[in-house]
Image (cartoon, rainbow, N blue to C red):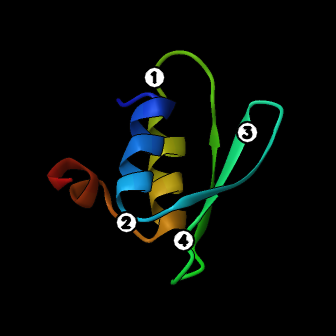
């Protein structure tokens, strides 16, 4: 599974920008589509369910992530 930094890197390449951060939770939003997701910036790999939910909130699938 990817780390939080990997997911943030992927989302930024797809046009997402940082909106705010509270503690360890980074909120990213796409300026055109309005999709928004929250990424917990913790060490280590993200749990599978959380990873899938973040991608879903951002409008992507796991296959989209793998294709990059």
* CA neighbours of label 2 inside 10 A, class few (<14), some (14 to 19), many (20+): some
Identify the image quadrant of the N terminus: top left
Kindly identify which numbered label has been placed on residue 30: 4
Residue 27, horizontal then vertical, whole percent? 69, 52
Q: Earlier in the sequence, mark 3 or mark 2?
A: 3
Rendered residue at 52%/55% (across/down):
53
Which mark lies nearer to you, 2 or 4?
A: 4
Q: Please identify, in this view, whether the residue under mark 1 or under mark 4 is nearer the observer.
A: 4
Q: Residues at badges 3 and 4 in contact (C-beta under 8 Å)?
A: no
In this rendering, the label closer to the viewer, 3 or 4: 4
Residue most extreme to the left = 67
Looking at the picture, tell me which residue is in the foreground, 53 or 15: 15
Q: Position of residue 46 (x, y in %)?
A: 49, 30
Q: Is residue 12 left or right of residue 22?
A: left
How far is the residue under mark 2 from the one under mark 4? 12 Å
Q: Image height check: is 24 above or below 60?
A: above
Q: Label 3 belongs to which residue?
A: 25
Dot 1 corresponds to which residue? 45
**Dot 4: few (<14), some (14–19), or many (≥20) neighbours within 10 Å?**
some
The nearer-to-camera label among 1 and 3 is 3
- What distance separates the C-alpha of mark 1 from that of mark 3? 15 Å
Nearest-to-viewer mark from 3 and 2: 3
| Sequence order check, earlier mark of 1 and 2 | 1
Q: Which mark is residue 60?
A: 2
The residue that appears at 20% across and 48% down in the rendered structure is: 66
Left or right of residue 44: residue 36? right
Q: Residue 4: horizontal and vertical position, in percent?
A: 50, 32
Instruction: State the image coordinates of residue 24 (x, y, percent, origin top left).
Output: 75, 30
The answer to whether the residues at label 3 and label 2 have Cβ atoms under 8 Å apart is no
């Amino acid at each position: 599974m990817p780390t939080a930094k990997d997911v943030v890197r992927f989302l930024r390449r797809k046009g997402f920008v940082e909106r705010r951060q509270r503690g360890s939770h980074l909120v990213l939003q796409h300026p055109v589509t309005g999709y928004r997701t929250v990424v917990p910036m913790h060490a280590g790999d993200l749990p599978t369910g959380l990873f899938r939910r973040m991608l879903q909130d951002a409008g992507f699938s796991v296959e989209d992530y793998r294709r990059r």
